[in-house]
Each structure stands twice: as C-alpha cells, then as structure tokens.
Image (cartoon, rainbow, N blue to C red):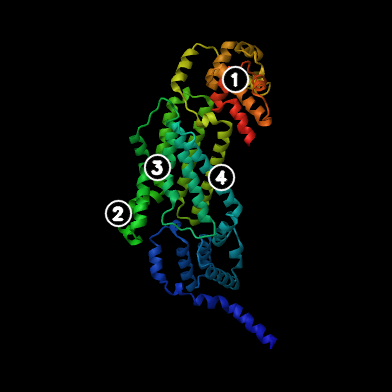
Amino acid sequence: MPTKNYLLAVILLYLLPNLLISQSKFENSIDCSKASISLSTTIVEDYNAKDFYILGFCEYKNENYLKAYDHFISAKSLGFTDHKTLQTYITDCRNKLIKSDVKEKIGSKKEDKVAINNYKHKVQVYFLNIVFVLIALIGLYTAFTLIYKYRKTVNNIYLGIFLFAISLGLIELVFYWQDFFSYSPAVSMYRVLFFVWAPSLYLYIKTKYTDTHINRKEITFHYLPFFLVLISLLIFGNFYDATDTQNNVLAKILGFMMKDNWIKTIHLSAYLTLIISDFELKRDQLDQGFKKWMLTLIGFIIILILFIIARAAFEHIYVFDYISKYFIAVYLILFISVLEVLLIIQPNIILGTINLEEKKKLNNKYKNSSLTENMSLRVKEQLLDSLNIDKIYLDNTLTLSKLAKKINVDRYSLSQVINQELNKNFYELINDYRIAEAVKIVETNTNKQVVDLIYECGFNNKVSFYKAFKQRMHMTPKDFIEKQKEK
C-alpha cells in the first residue's frame, strides 16, 4: 500500500505542471496567429512582460521548448504578474529540454541565448539596484539644492534641471529591472526626459559667462522638443486608446521621435556642435580649472553619443539593447558621482560664473608681462604649498611683499598669478584661508571666544575679521558659534 501511494505521488508530481497549465483561462483566450501578426508590428525593445509570455505560450504549444523557455525568462525579468503559472512553464520547459538531451544549451553562458537572457538575473543583483537608487536620490537632492539654494546664479538652475532629469531616468530604469512589482508604462519617462539633457547642459555652459543673457524665447526654443513630447504623452496616454494612437499620424511622429536612436543622436550632436563652437570662441580667456570642466562636459556628451549610435546600429539585437541600457546607467551614475565630488572640492568652478570682461581687463593689464604659462603654474604651485602646508596666512603681519619673498618671486608676478589663476586679489585669497581656519577651530571647540578666534586665524583686528566672516559665512562669528553648539 505505501508503495502504491508513493508511485501515485510521483505520477502526480510529474503530471502537475501539465495539469496546472491546462487549467489557465488566460491561455485559452490567446490566438497565436493573431498575436504573431500584432507583435510583428512592434520592435522587440518595446515588448512588455505579457507580450513575451504570449510568445512563450505559442512556442510551447508548437513544442519549441527552447524558444518558449527564452521568452518565459524574458517575461519573468520584466515582472509578469502570474508568477506561479510562469514558473510552472519555465520548469516544464527545462524538464522537456533536459529530457531531449539539450541540457548543455540551457547551462552554457557562452553558447546559448537562453543563458544570455538569464544574464539579467545575475547582473542586476539587488545590491547594484540599491546603489543605483541611492546615487540617483543623492542626484535628486543635489538638483533641488542647485535649483533652490543657488538659484540666484542662473547657470546653477540649468545644471539642477539636467541632474534632476538623469537622476529620475535612472530611478525609472531600476523600476524596470527590479522584480518586486510590475512596471510597464505605455511610454517610458526617461525617453521624454532625454530631451531635457542636452538643452540644459548647453544653457548651463552658456549662462556661466556673465556677459551672456538668454531671453524666454530662446529658452522655449531649446526645450520645445521636450514640451512637445511631454504634451503628446499626456494627451495620447490619457485620451486615446492603443488603436486610435496607431491610426494618428501625429502620435506616430512623436512616438518615432521618442524611440528612434538616430533622432537622439542628431539631437545630441547638434548641441555638442553648439557647445564646442562656443567653447572655442572663449577658450583662450578661460582659466585652467574652467577649461578642464568644459572639456569634461564635452567628453561626457561625446561618449553618450557613441553609446546611442551603438544602440541605433544594433537595436535589432535584444540582448545588446538591454546591456547597452545598463552601461548607459552605469555611465550616468559615474557622472553624478564625479559631479558630487567636484561640488565638494571645487565648488567655485562648478557653481561660479566666468567674467570675461574682467578677464579681458586682466589680460590687457598683464599683456606686457614676461611671465610665461609654465612660470605662472610654478608660482601658483609654490603659493598653494605655502598656504596649505605652511599655513602662512596665520601670520597677522603678512603682506604681498612678504609672501613673494617667502616663495622667492617678485611681488608683481605673484599678484598676476593670484589675479589670473585664482580670480582674486591678495587680501581676498588670504582672508578666504583665514575664515576657513576660523571655521575649523570653532567646529573642534565650540567654547572658543570670538576675541581669541580673531588672532588665532591670522587677523589683527575685530572689524576686518567680522566683515570677512560675514561676507563668506552669511552670519556673524557669534551666531556661527551658537549654531555649532546646537549640533
């Protein structure tokens, strides 16, 4: 009797997948020939989980278990809702393939497309998704800070908009990759936000120059593609069904704009041309720091264009489409991370403006100077060493002549380097370092008296100290000390 029960259990376990499959109502409503015709009009990258499931079911009915397995795995990675039935199909396909002596085709990463699709599950580990979301959230926070806190400088608003757009796009990509819930919007938001990237970067660079004024018409012109795509998304996404949208010419054109990678390449390349031409006109008037930052942004756009060209050339390969999206996401994460670091170590370059008129005046002032570029860089290096290592600014009797003697250079050459390389005069530079020192002292000892603080950081009178402190910290030394005590 126990032996009979055991045999009955084994038979039931073997037949259970087929029993479960045959009971599904959804599959009974699938017409494979109609589904094949319908899906043939859609590119593979736009298939959702349900589409892959239908393809898998049709291949399963035709006993093409290898293709069925491939489609079911894709449906699973995109978050098909009926996990139980889907897993039953996957298990049954695997069993049939093993039984048919094709086990190696499923297990080999290098030889089988099934394993390549399964690569999604191995690469998109939860840890990487969490890292992506965290960095994107930091990007969103920084974007709001730039737009709100630093809005008085117009270029920071455009940088904030750019950072907001790429951060939000990254979060949406993680929504696609995770399997906690199904995310299959009619139109991906990152496709719409893409048309914000290049205009925002261009306007950020353009408005960094204080002599540049951009009117509303120009701003509207640059963001027009984004607004057109956004409005169409709202209209056709809410008031038209799929059939009406397919028959609407405007909807087809806007859909083509959003999805076609060659259109995106042309869009980015146009702005790259504008940025490079603008940079070349003003290149000789820029400091090394600003010049390197501009070149970094140009390099960022060039690499992004290369990614999109590759996607356009190989978009018919489904696996490449997925992997390329992943690499673009990693690239954007790296850019956000680099930007966050630069905002900490070189905020003046990222957030500051470039006064070309002032630069012209300085260039005219020093046009007869014998100081070469190499000499200027050497003097700058010696100056920064004296400030950062020797802390010469703590000497409250320090003068330009005394500092020049310390680094073994004439006072006129030193003044030129400070003006041209650091965009400051001698007293602004020294007071920057003295106030930074005062802040460090207070942060380590909140009981420090203001009178003692004045002399410890290099000042020799109260009036100069208060004026320099309030100018840089936007509060009095006493208020700053009280604020630190509250922490």
The CA span between labels 1 and 3 is 54 Å
As drawn, 175 above or below 464: below
First-in-chain label (3 vs 2): 2
| Disc 2 secondary structure class | helix
Question: Looking at the picture, does residue 464 appear above or below residue 155?
Answer: above
Give the residue at mark 2.
249
Residue 259 image point, x, y percent: 41, 51
Residue at 47 percent of width and 38 percent of height:
160
Mark with earlier residue (2, 4): 4
What is the three-letter code of the residue carrying label 4?
Ile
Q: Amino acid at mark 3?
A: Ile
How many residues crowd mark 4 within 10 Å: few (<14), some (14–19), many (20+)?
many
Residue that numbered label 1 is attached to: 465
Q: Secondary structure at mark 4?
A: helix
* Quadrant assignment, res 454: top right
Query: Dot 1 surroundings within 10 Å: few (below 14), some, or many (20 or more)?
Result: many
Q: In whole angstroms, how far apart are the C-alphas of marks 4 and 1?
A: 39 Å
Q: Amino acid at mark 1?
A: Phe
Front label number (3 vs 4): 4
The residue mark sitting in front, 2 or 4, is: 4
Residue 409 left/right relative to 21: right
Q: CA distance from mark 2 to mark 4?
A: 39 Å
Residue at mark 4:
135
Which residue is disc 3 drawn over? 266
| Cα distance in 3D space between marks 3 and 4 | 29 Å
**Residue occupying the point 35% across, 38% down:** 220
Crowd around label 3: few <14 · some 14–19 · many ≥20 (10 Å) = few
| Numbered badge on residue 478 | none
